[in-house]
Image (cartoon, helix red, strand yellow):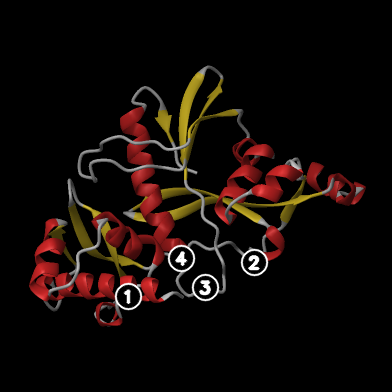
Amino acid sequence: MSETRTHARNRYEVLILTIFRNRYKRGMSDFEFERSELESVAENLGVKLPKNLGDLIYSFRYRSALPAEILATETGGKEWVIEPAGRARYRFKLAKISRIVPRPDLIATKIPDATPEIITAYALSDEQALLAKVRYNRLVDIFLGLTTYSLQNHMRTTVKGLAKSRSTKSTSVSTRTGSNSSFPFRQKVVRTSSPLSRPGRIFRVAKRNTQALAAARYPRNSCETA
Amino acid sequence: MRDGVIAMFELTVQRGEVEVVEERHYRLVPASEISGEDLQLYSSR
């Protein structure tokens, strides 16, 4: 890990921990805070403010573990998650621990690999390679048993009660017996050896947000999440 | 995932919690690695 990365992570931890300490009282199961509080906390502490405040929040929602002092207050089989609570507003919430991980004993169906070799050779990341494989092999169609069409790689819209705009990685629209449906998707490459892989947390947030986004964007369609 | 397996989930929210509706695993292989036995197994599901 580079020095710069280490420094950034420590700065993120200091800021989120200070906000938590300012707001949390023993026994609380949720509380809200404004994104602007990050600015005032950073100023008070003399910490250089990250250029992208959204990345700080994103980091603790998806990539990094919260500081140990925060984790130590988790009780009753619950864990702290950070949810959007409106425009530039977030909610720390103690939520039931939900670990959605692939079953190790589930049979894997063999599918003839239709991924072009050139795509495999030049994919820039694991996530990009995964998306290409899913698309070229029509795994969404196979999984859903429907004919689906890729509509949009990033869907952005506004949902009351959530942040002003969020995005999903890709969205497909399918037709079946004349009805139309929209399916927001999130993909994640999970390395089982990584202690920071928290797929339960990722899927929890992705599910709630993407379903609301699809419903807001495509009100005439039924909206499911896969 | 193990051996490059791709796991797909259908999720839903019940009582405020995310739950799995369906889970399927797929392994992309050269066509030559799919045997008659495999196809017989798949057609009987």
How far apart marks 4 and 3 lie (CA) works out to 14 Å
Looking at the image, residue A59 sits to the left or right of residue A37; the answer is: right
How far apart marks 3 and 2 lie (CA) works out to 17 Å
Tell me whether circle 4 and circle 2 mark residues in contact (CB < 8 Å). no
Q: Which residue is mark 3?
A: A194
How far apart marks 1 and 4 lie (CA) works out to 30 Å
Mark 4 Cα shell of 10 Å, populated few (<14), some (14-19), many (≥20): some
Instruction: Give residue A173's position: percent from left, percent from top.
Output: 50, 28
Looking at the image, residue B36 sits to the left or right of residue A95; the answer is: right
Mark 3 Cα shell of 10 Å, populated few (<14), some (14-19), many (≥20): few
Sequence-wise, the earlier of marks 1 and 3 is 1
Dot 4 falls on which chain? A
Sequence-wise, the earlier of marks 4 and 3 is 4
How far apart marks 2 and 1 lie (CA) works out to 37 Å
Instruction: Give residue B26's position: percent from left, percent from top.
Output: 69, 51
Dot 1 falls on which chain? A
Q: Quadrant of residue A126?
A: bottom right
Q: Label 2's element? A: loop
Q: Amino acid at mark 3?
A: Ser
Looking at the image, residue A196 sits to the left or right of residue A79; the answer is: right
Please give the label number shown on residue A104. 2
How far apart marks 4 and 2 lie (CA) works out to 14 Å
Dot 2 falls on which chain? A
Q: Which residue is mark 4?
A: A99
Please give the label number shown on residue A7. 1
Tell me whether circle 2 and circle 1 mark residues in contact (CB < 8 Å). no
Q: Nearer the viewer, residue A211 or B40?
A: A211
Q: Amino acid at mark 2?
A: Pro
Residue at horizontal 62 percent and vertical 39 percent from the top: A135
Q: Nearer the viewer, mark 4 or mark 3?
A: 3
